[in-house]
Image (cartoon, rainbow, N blue to C red):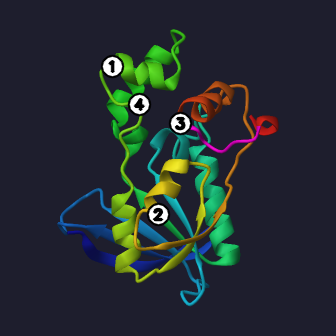
Amino acid sequence: MIKIQAEANVPTEHGSFRMIAFSENENDWMPHMAIVAENTDFSKPVNVRFHSECITGEVFHSKKCECGQQLDAAMKYTHEHGGIIVYLRQEGRNIGIINKLKAYSLQEKGLDTVQANLQLGLPADDRKFGVAIDILNLLDVKDINLLTNNPEKVKYVVDSNIHLNSRIPLQIPANEMSKGYLQTKKDFFGHLLDDNDN
């Protein structure tokens, strides 16, 4: 079972957050994280974002996806309204950065994100969100507003012991590079995206 390994207050350009590392082993270099806004009221439904790691989008500001912008928007939202970002180490829909770059190479030849993963013999999306539920339970969160466009994340909450109060869309307008990626999210995965935004 995962447990809290370390925590500290971290000031960011979006505000101050309590960052908490969760893993089974204290020597784990890639723990899952909870990023808790300092004004979070745990007596009310807590705004929560399940966010999977995306080094290309978050660190290098790739235009192929909206992950970095979603993380920034979630940090801004939780700073303003209170909330928690559960940051999951599931790079590239949990295929890892090496396979993600291989998939990118196939996308350069005309495949979409799902086709590229499948051609590599990998799942279209291998992410699991049960650990996010475990983290919320460890933080004693009972009732949440989920910031997501992904119905799979909604299902994990509905099937858990945590009450889903509402879903808050977290939609980033498409650019020319991300338009196909977002369309695949909508068409293949059923993400709740408005046509006028992608």
Structural distance between the alpha carbons of marks 2 and 1: 30 Å
Q: Secondary structure at mark 2?
A: helix
Question: Mark 3 = which residue?
Answer: 189
Q: Comparing marks 1 and 4, which lies closer to the viewer?
A: 4
The residue pinned by badge 4 equals: 124
Q: Are marks 4 and 3 in contact (CB under 8 Å)?
A: yes
Seen from this angle, which residue lies furthest top?
109
Instruction: Tell me the mark number nearer the camera, choosing from 2 and 4.
Output: 2
Q: Is residue 192 magenta?
A: yes
User: Quarter-wise, where is residue 44 in the image?
Assistant: bottom right
Q: Quadrant of the C terminus?
A: top right
Residue 60 in view here: yes
Q: Amino acid at mark 1?
A: Leu
Which picture quadrant has residue 126? top left
Q: Which residue is mark 2?
A: 157
Q: Is residue 169 left or right of residue 196?
A: left
Q: Amino acid at mark 4?
A: Ala
Sooner in the amino-acid sequence: mark 4 or mark 3:
4
Q: Picture coordinates of residue 74 (x, y %)?
A: 62, 61
Quarter occupied by the N terminus: bottom left
Residue 123, position in %: x, y?
Answer: 35, 31
Amino acid type, residue under disc 2 in the picture: Val
Q: Main secondary structure of the magenta part?
A: loop
User: Which residue is denoted by mark 1 in the rendering?
Assistant: 120
Q: Which residues are magenta?
A: 189-194
Classify mark 4: residues with Cα within 10 Å, few (<14), some (14-19) or many (20+).
Answer: some
- Circle 2 packing at 10 Å, graded few (<14), some (14-19), many (20+), is some
The secondary structure type at the circle numbered 4 is loop
Asked whether 158 or 184 is in front, the reply is 158
Tell whether position 161 is magenta. no
